[in-house]
Amino acid sequence: MPGCRQRQYYSSSKIKPVITGSNPVCVGQTSSISPSSGGTWVSLNPTIASVSNSGLITALSQGFARFIFTNSTTNCASDTSSALTVLGITPTSFAGPSTICKGSQTQVNPSSGGTWISLNPSVATITNSGLVTGVSAGAAALKFTNANGCVTNANLMVSVQDNPSIILDGPNQICPSTNTQFCHQSAVRG
């Protein structure tokens, strides 16, 4: 027909980003999102999680993060991704000394809300309430996993020393109001 134009229809297939890795993740862990090539990724919550152009997501702090992909050929942006949940880790610290003697105890925090393990139980043991007991001389790393399953990034290190050897370096019988002396075994006079 004269004066009529032919209509053309174009189909557009907008990229739908998909989190293909773990979700949720803990702070310090990674996940992934697709597509992994052909454009650039942007995190809408960069303080919570970052994303590389290959789709590698790094969890930075507790919260939720969403992402947008821009196709490098069409310059078209994707829909916003579903939310990645980033779970927090629990801070750990010594409430008592970090160096103890064999048979002595110290306390670490937190004292609840997860599970403690000693990575060297022949040197030091730990209860889930954070009570550390020295077993033998050496060093042991202590690791905490919170109720969400997130493991502390840095282990606490406890140092266990042998009990000092002391000997009596004076009379072994004394009267009231008199003194005697004990010495560390290495300080004994020859």
Image (tube, rainbow, N blue to C red):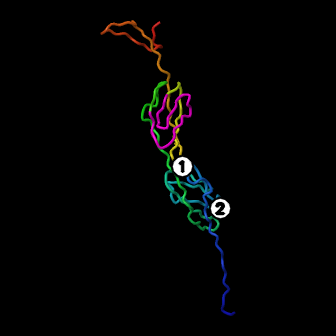
The x and y percentages for residue 156 are 50, 36
Left or right: 166, with 151 as reference point: left
The residue nearer to you, when weighing 20 against 5, is 20
SS state under label 1: strand
Q: Which residues are magenta?
A: 107-133
- Residue at 65% over, 59% down: 37
Please identify the residue farthest to the left as the structure is shown.
177
Query: Residue 60 at what x, y percent from top left?
Result: 52, 50
Task: Classify the position of the N terminus by image quarter.
Answer: bottom right
Query: Residue 26 — which label?
Result: 1
Return the x and y of residue 119 as percentages of the image width and height: 56, 34
Three-letter amino acid code at the position of disc 2: Gly
Label placed on residue 38: 2
Q: Nearer the viewer, residue 64 or 73?
A: 64
Q: Residue furthest right?
A: 1
Q: How many marks?
A: 2
Tell me the kind of residue under disc 1: Cys
Q: Residues within 10 Å of mark 2 (few under 14, many from 20)?
A: some
Q: Which residue lies at the image location 50% right of the left edge and 33% below the top edge?
A: 126
The answer to whether residue 123 is magenta is: yes
